[in-house]
Image (cartoon, rainbow, N blue to C red):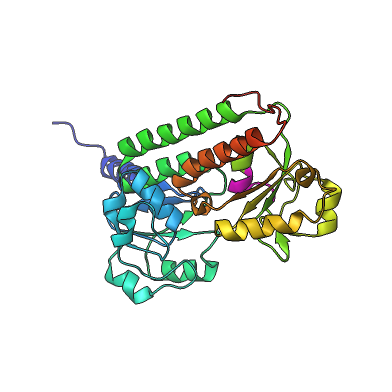
């Protein structure tokens, strides 16, 4: 019988060593968060703590609502989220409470949770999924990623596609060839508005308007009266906490008839807080905002159609 070559055992060992990293890489359940970081888990996340109301809403849309074992204050979308135990908010949370829930992953809101707080969770050995959604078009892709994290890809894909279709319909209906400029007012004294790259700016663009301060990089810059007068908005939209405050803000602008929005009676109040929830309800609120703006334009005496897109 021929003898086995002496190097055979070493070759087998070498092959096993070369193969081991591939087996290790294939074993965990992998998902990328909104910052592109790869999370490797032993299985799809079945116990999730969400520190972001927006992420909580998106998890429900992705079919993973039942897998959320803890969430933050103000997580009220959808209604079922109100029954989930609270662990604090994005700024301050109860670490012991989080540990007691034995989460597979914690979802931290990059734009709300301080980095030091995120690092604190990571030091406890809990994987952290970084949630980061700023634009309307980010919502659908975030749903898909959360579906991958939770192993609910089939539901997530359907929800994401429906959200994308809803956005396409809004944009087709309210498209404008020459978008009027609009001041988005989110606070009074001083006047705060919205800069470029923000969901509110996207919402108004979807409605067929151009953000008056869309050239500013700051998320929510304070602007002076002189600046508003110089930029001469064609529409002023008061996004106030409630309808009463919205009308109070708009009354202040009526003192300046030189502003085209004032001169032509295009002062509009809107107080649907879903616009700022960073979840699927934001798209529904965008549709309502577009309809409100279109209705206000149509109701003006002598109004002319400014839209190319639809009713």
Residue 144 in percent (x, y) is at 41, 40
Residue at image coords 48%, 54%? 131
Q: Position of residue 49 (x, y in %)?
A: 35, 61
195 is within the stretch colored magenta: yes
Image quarter of the C terminus: top right
Rendered image quadrant of residue 290: top right
* Prevailing secondary structure class for the magenta stretch in the rendered image: loop
- Give the magenta-colored segment's residue range: 194-201
- Seen at 34% across and 68% down, the residue is 86
> Compared with residue 73, is residue 251 higher up or lower down, i.e. above or below?
above
Query: Residue 175, image x and y in percent?
Result: 63, 28
Q: Is residue 166 left or right of residue 193?
A: left
Depth check: 282 or 136 in front? Answer: 282
Quarter of the image for the N terminus: give it. Answer: top left
Q: Is residue 207 visible?
A: no
| Residue at screen point 43% across, 53% down | 55
Q: Quadrant of residue 173?
A: top right
Horizontal side of 4 relative to 195 (left or right) equals left
Q: Residue furthest front?
A: 301
The image shows residue 217, relative to residue 177, as above or below, that is: below
Count numbered badges in the picture.
0
Q: Does residue 181 appear in this view?
A: yes
Q: Residue at the location (56% across, 42% down)?
A: 289
Closer-to-camera residue (257/211)? 257
Locate residue 218, reporting x and y percent.
Answer: 70, 55
Q: Quadrant of residue 154?
A: top left
Magenta run includes residue 29 = no
């Amino acid at each position: 019988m021929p003898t086995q070559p002496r190097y055979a055992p070493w070759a087998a060992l070498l092959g096993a060593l070369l193969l081991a990293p591939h087996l290790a890489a294939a074993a965990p359940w992998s998902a990328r968060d909104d910052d592109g970081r790869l999370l490797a888990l032993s299985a799809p996340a079945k116990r999730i703590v969400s520190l972001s109301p927006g992420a909580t809403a998106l998890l429900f849309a992705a079919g993973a609502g039942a897998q959320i074992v803890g969430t933050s204050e103000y997580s009220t979308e959808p209604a079922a989220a109100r029954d989930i135990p609270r662990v604090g908010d994005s700024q301050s949370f109860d670490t012991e409470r989080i540990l007691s829930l034995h989460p597979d992953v914690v979802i931290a809101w990059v734009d709300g949770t301080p980095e030091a707080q995120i690092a604190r969770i990571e030091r406890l050995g809990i994987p952290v999924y970084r949630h980061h959604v700023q634009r309307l078009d980010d919502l659908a892709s975030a749903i898909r990623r959360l579906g991958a994290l939770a192993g609910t890809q089939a539901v997530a894909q359907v929800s994401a596609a429906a959200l994308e279709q809803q956005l396409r319909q809004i944009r087709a209906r309210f498209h404008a060839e020459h978008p009027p400029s609009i001041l988005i007012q989110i606070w009074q004294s001083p006047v705060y508005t919205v800069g470029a790259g923000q969901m509110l700016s996207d919402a108004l663009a979807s409605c067929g308007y151009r953000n008056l301060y869309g050239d500013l990089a700051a998320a929510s810059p304070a602007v002076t009266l002189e600046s508003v007068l110089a930029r001469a908005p064609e529409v002023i939209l008061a996004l106030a906490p409630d309808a009463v405050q919205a009308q109070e803000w708009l009354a202040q602008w009526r003192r300046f008839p030189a502003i085209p929005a004032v001169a032509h009676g295009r002062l509009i109040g809107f107080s649907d807080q879903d616009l700022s929830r960073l979840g699927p309800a934001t798209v529904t609120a965008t549709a309502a905002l577009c309809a409100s703006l279109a209705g206000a334009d149509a109701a003006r005496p002598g109004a002319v159609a400014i839209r190319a897109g639809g009713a």
